Amino acid sequence: MKDPEKGAKVWVQLSGAKTAGIVLDTAFSSEGDYMQCKIELLAVNPLVPAQLLRQVYPRPIQSYLLSKRGETLPGEAQG
């Protein structure tokens, strides 16, 4: 993603796995050619499928590792 907005639903590419996430905050990189993004990762709880497990990723993620996510996960608020 070139310019992710706060609150955007995204797929995050981490260690070869695609994980659902939400952009919490963005800042320009020192090089200025991409954004550094603070991301909240989402996963469906296997014990309670209508509930999401949420975790803020501890390091900034580069915007080129993000792609737009059109679908809404079970338990995620609409809109």
Image (cartoon, rainbow, N blue to C red):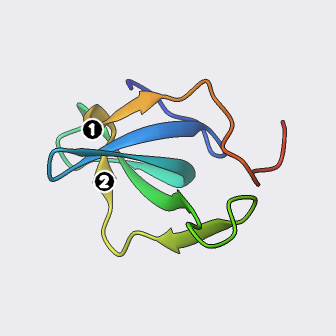
Relative placement, left or right, of 66 versus 52 is: left
Q: Secondary structure at mark 1?
A: helix
Residue identifier under label 2: 61
Number of other residues with Cα within 10 Å of mark 2, as a class: few under 14, some 14 to 19, many 20 or more: some
Q: Quadrant of residue 28?
A: top left
| Residue 33: quadrant of the picture | top left
Mark 1 highlights which residue? 65
Whether residues under marks 2 and 1 lie with C-beta atoms below 8 angstroms apart, the answer is yes
Horizontal arrangement in the rendering, residue 32 relative to residue 43 (left or right): left
Work out whether residue 28 or residue 67 is closer to the camera in this orientation and state it.
67
**Looking at the image, which residue is at 72% across and 65% down?**
51
Q: Which mark is residue 28?
A: none
- Work out which quarter of the rendered image holds the N terminus and state it: top left
Q: Is residue 64 left or right of residue 42?
A: left
Q: Label 1 amino acid?
A: Leu
Q: Is residue 45 above or below residue 22?
A: below
Please state the horizontal and vertical placement of residue 16, each as a whole percent of the image. Answer: 15, 45
Disc 2 and disc 1: Cα gap in Å?
A: 7 Å
Task: Label 2, secondary structure: give it.
Answer: strand
Q: Residue at x 51, y 50 (%)?
A: 21
Tag 2: amino acid: Ile
Give the position of the C terminus as an image quadrant.
top right
Q: Quadrant of residue 53?
A: bottom right
Question: In front here: 40 or 61?
Answer: 40
